[in-house]
Structures are given as structure tokens and as C-alpha cells.
Amino acid sequence: MKFPSVKNLFQNAGLTVERFPFESLFALAGTIAATVKIELTYTSRVQENWSLRAILVANLGLLLSLSATLYTESKGWTGGKKLLFRLIAAVVAVLFIFIINPGIHGSDHIRFVLLSLSFHLLVAFAAFTDKAHINGFWQFNKTLFLRFLTSALYGLVLFAGLAAAIGAMNFLFNFKFEWDTFSILFTWITGIFSTLFFLAGVPANFESLDADVSYPKGLKVFTQYVLIPLATVYVAILLSYEIKILVQWELPKGLVSNLILGYAVFGILSLLLVYPIREQEENKWLKTYTRSFYFLLIPLLALLFAAAGTRVFRYGITEMRYFLIMLAAWLLFITLYFLIAKKQSIKLIPISLSLLILLSVYGPQSAFSVAMSSQQRVLTGLFKKYNAYNKGKLMPIDSSKISKIDAGRAVSTLDYLIYRHGLSSLQPYFTNDLDKVGDSLSVEKTAGNVVVNVGDYELRWRKLEWVKKRLGLSKFSQYDYQDPIYSDTAESYTTYRFKIKNTIALSTTGYDFVASENKNYDDTVSYTVKADNFIQTVKYGTYSLQINGQTAYFSVEKHLKELAKVNPKAKIVVNTGANTDTYTLPDSLLTWTQKIKGYTVVFKIRQVNFNTGKSEFSIQYLDANYLIKKE
């Protein structure tokens, strides 16, 4: 095997950048933004949010630019016309940085995923917008798929090798490369190396692809002996279940929606993978399988519509239910097309799905507008039921008259609207300026009168508590009401908020070090202070601090579960006017001490919000500190 020289590698990289200049710039911009975000983690919420927005826009820009390049190349455009078209695509992508703001609107995370998915599909057919060249279209996407897998494999191997080398340097030479070094390394390998490697393999001669009749034997084996049997198992189970619910005359379970979508994905993927060989004599059975697949999909789609419709009727429309109905309608359209149309084109699959996804992102018909309107109607309907809706405004509800389930549903709907659509989604129902309210809730003063931004979760919680207080719902929780999207067996939870009396100032008298801890997910962070090495770890509800190889463990989950069972009247003072599940505790109940060799470690919680049920436990927010004293 002849390996390419370093000179050839750089030449190929240069040719790739020359062919894809905008794509390369977006890849570089996204990589730099990701690096900045890693460095800013837990330091600046505003700047971190801007970095995230830059990453998202870079992803969309790369995809749109690649689509524009492929389209112009397929049309044979050159010079200024080609440059202008690509420049317009790049500018459109950049404008999204002023539109997408996941730090304010949680729904923008979903919007980005939808836009990215739509633009991925756009890449698939951008070079094949005419009616012909079906085989070229298939060969092109096969090449892209294999190139993607290869670039991912090479990138992972390169990262693993360099990460091992860095780890060896830490071990052998006492270097202090921290976790962010590995994150940045992975970012640059993925963002630059893997991206350029992938782009270098994008076919340029689209005409020759149409004449390519090669077909990987391994792909046929994988499809014939893995995907098609899996799809067959799925349809057998689902049809049996459909017969069962018809005989027993009961509503379908929510989870059946996932199974039907899984069958549809497996089936359509199988048909696409074997498309070029369906006419071969030994593969005539594929035509029979194709028609039977679409015929069997019809009763399953009826089941899917029934499952989705039941939940929409009961709980209103959310984004997830909107997408479920949208996919069901699209599958019905595709099914009828391949059963009825005489001249069929597999290009219709990505084209129709890409357009449908775009329509669901923005506009009055979008998932977010429809879902917000639906949940606003649910909210106003609940307040009308208890005569707390007057002249288009929400009025305080009499908490002694409203049922716990209805109150929980109201709080759940408020939480949904605030998280997905921002506090401004409730502006029509309040006389207060909610933008100003949100701004005031986003900051707090420390003991030294320094104004700091609060975290995203804390801000969301503050907004919800503000609204609940003004609507007379302070003593109710969203966990009093379960709103299953796919599951009919959602577990009931209770939410608690424990805090000490003074959550602002922290006395450090008698201690040598103080380390903050605010993670509510499994993670590990290491750092060095003077000559001491520290490692903070969160794993399975246990918080630990390792100092120079000695570890202090604190079973926070266990302690909080025990506190939740304690009679509040015995040891806990309930906050006046706050949620009945919000308690002010003596410092001693939220402080634990461990002695290790050479140190005394105190873990002190100032505030914690958590959910607990029969079998589940999750911390939603934590503000705690390690206090360390040298012996």
C-alpha cells in the first residue's frame, strides 16, 4: 500500500478548501466558537450562550453552503453567478444567529435540530433537482454515507491516539492537562480534520455517477439479513397488537407510536438500500416485499393516528405531538405515492420530508406556534373553569377551590410555556411588562452587592415561581399532574426545594479552601491549588472530593431522600407564602463532614431542588460548597 506524502495531503486539503471555501470558513468558525464555549463553561451565561449560537449557525451555514455548492456545480454555473448564489446561502445562514437563541427560548434547541435535519436532506438532493439521474442520486448518497463513516472512524482513532499521548505526558512528566484540553482536542479533530476529510470525498462528477452500477455486496447482505428481518419482526408484533386492541376495544398505548415509526424507518431504509438491485432477476422478490411493506403500513398508520389523536384530545398539542402527527401524515403520503404512482422516484422521500420539516419550524403553521396556541387555550380553559379569567387576563385562583390535579396541570402548562416559549408567551394574560420582570429575575446581588447573572435553570424556576405567586398557585407543583406524551405509565413525583436561611453569604472562617459545586449530572472536574491536586466528582447521586489521592464521599441522594420523609413540623420551618414543598432547614441538616488523611472536608448545601418518586430521584438544581481544612 502506498501512503500519500505530507505534501500531497496538504495539496489535497488546499484543493478541498478551494472547492468549498464557505464550508471551510463555517467549519473553522464553529470550531473556534466551540473552543470558546468550553473555556467559558460556568463562567459567563451570556457569553456562553453567544458561543452556542455561533456553533449552531456554523453547522447550518456549512450545510446550506454545501447544498449551494452542489446545486451550482450540477447546473454548471461558474464565476460570479456561482459565487453570488453561494454567498446568499452563507448570508442566510449567518442571519440565524439573530433568530436562534436557546438561552431564552428552550424551543430553539428543537428548531435548530429541525433546520439541521432539513439542510442535511437538502444536501442529499441539491445536485439532483431534475427528474432524471435516479441512479446517480443513489450512488451520490451512498458515497456520502460511506465517506461520513470513514471520516468519523479516522477522527476517533486520531483523537484516541492523541488523547492517550496527552495522558501519558500527564503521568510521566507531571503535566497538568485538564479535561478541557481533551474537549478542545476532540472539537478541533471533529470540526476541522473530519470535516475537511469528508468534504474531500464529496463527488464532483455527477454525470459519471449515473453510469455507476456498482453495488456493495456487504450492503445487500446487511439489508437482506438484518434490516428486512427486523422490519418483519416489527410489523408482526404491531399487527398482533392492533388485532388485540380491536378485539378488546381499548385505546392504544402511547409507546406504540415509537414502534410504528421504528418499523417505518427500518422499512423505508431497507427499500432505499436495495433500490439499485430491485430489477435484477434474482431479486424480483424485492418488488413484492416493497408493495407488501406499504400495504401493511396502512393499518399501522391508522393506529398511529389513533394513538396521537387520543393524546391531543386529552392534553392538547405540544411540539412532540405535532411532529408525531406530521410524520404520520408524511408516511401516509409516501405510502399512497408508492402504491398508486406509475412513475416513482425515491428522490421524493428527502425532498418532501425536507420541505415539510422547514414548514414546521417558523410561521403560524409551525409546530411551535400551534403548540403554544394549544397550550394557551388549555391554560385559559382551566382558569375559566374556576372563574379566574376576566377580560382576557388571568386572575388569582382560589387555592382552596381548585383541585390538585387541575392546579398541577395549570402549573405544568405554565412551566411548559415559560421554558419552550419564554415568559413573553404569557404577556397577553398579564398587565405587567414580562420582559422587564424576566430581566429583574435574571440577576441577583451577592453579599458584596455585586450583581451577577443566575443560571439557566434557576432563572426558569424563578420565572415560574413569580407567575405561580401572582396566580395563587404557589402551593402547587407541576408534578401533581402527569402529562404523558408517549407513556401511559408515567411515575408520580414530588418536588422539593430545600434551602438554608442564608443563601447569599458563606462563612469560611477556619477553612483553607472553598470549592463550589453546582452540577446536577454525572461529571468530573480536576484542578490544582498551589501544591494540592483536587478532583470533584458527581456520580449516581454521590458527590466526592479527592485531595492528593484521598477521597471524601457524600451520599447526597440518600440524605435528601431521608429528609423528604421527615415530618416538616418536627424539624423544618416552612417558608411563608411559598410552595408547600419548599422548606428552610437548619444548616446542620444540609451540612456533612468527612475526615480524610490530612484534611477535613465539609459539604454544605445552600439550596437544592429535587424530584423524588417511588423508584426515581433527580436533582434539578444545586448550590453547594466544599469547605476544606488542612489538619
Image (cartoon, rainbow, N blue to C red):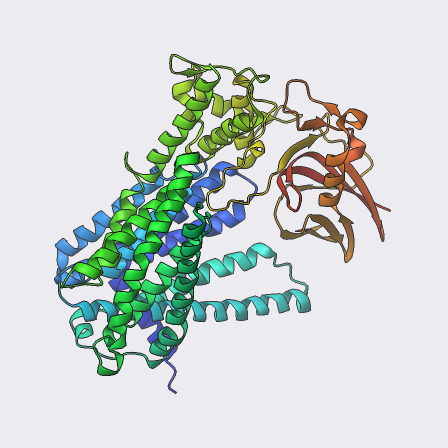
Residue at image x 37%, y 50%? Answer: 303
Q: Is residue 455 visible?
A: no
**Residue placed farthest to the front in the image?**
247
Residue at image x 37%, y 70%? Answer: 228
- Nearest the camera: 484 or 90? 484
Residue at image x 46%, y 46%? Answer: 486
Q: Image quadrant of residue 432?
A: top left
Q: Image quadrant of residue 222?
A: bottom left
Residue 564, horizontal then vertical, whole percent: 72, 35
Question: Is residue 193 rendered to the left or right of residue 444?
Answer: left
Residue 523, horizontal then vertical, whole percent: 62, 52
In the depicted structure, whether residue 431 falls above or below residue 39: above
- Nearest the camera: 32 or 72? 72
Question: Is residue 280 rendered to the left or right of residue 176?
Answer: left
**Residue placed farthest to the bottom in the image?**
1
In the depicted structure, whether residue 622 falls above or below residue 219: above
**Residue placed farthest to the right in the image?**
631
Q: Is residue 314 visible?
A: yes
Residue 166, horizontal then vertical, whole percent: 59, 66
- Nearest the camera: 177 or 59? 59
Question: Is residue 564 rendered to the left or right of residue 110?
Answer: right
Give the tally of numbered discs. 0
In the depicted structure, whether residue 54 falls above or below residue 65: above
Quadrant where the N terminus is found in the figure: bottom left
**Residue placed farthest to the top in the image?**
391
Residue 574, horizontal then vertical, whole percent: 71, 23
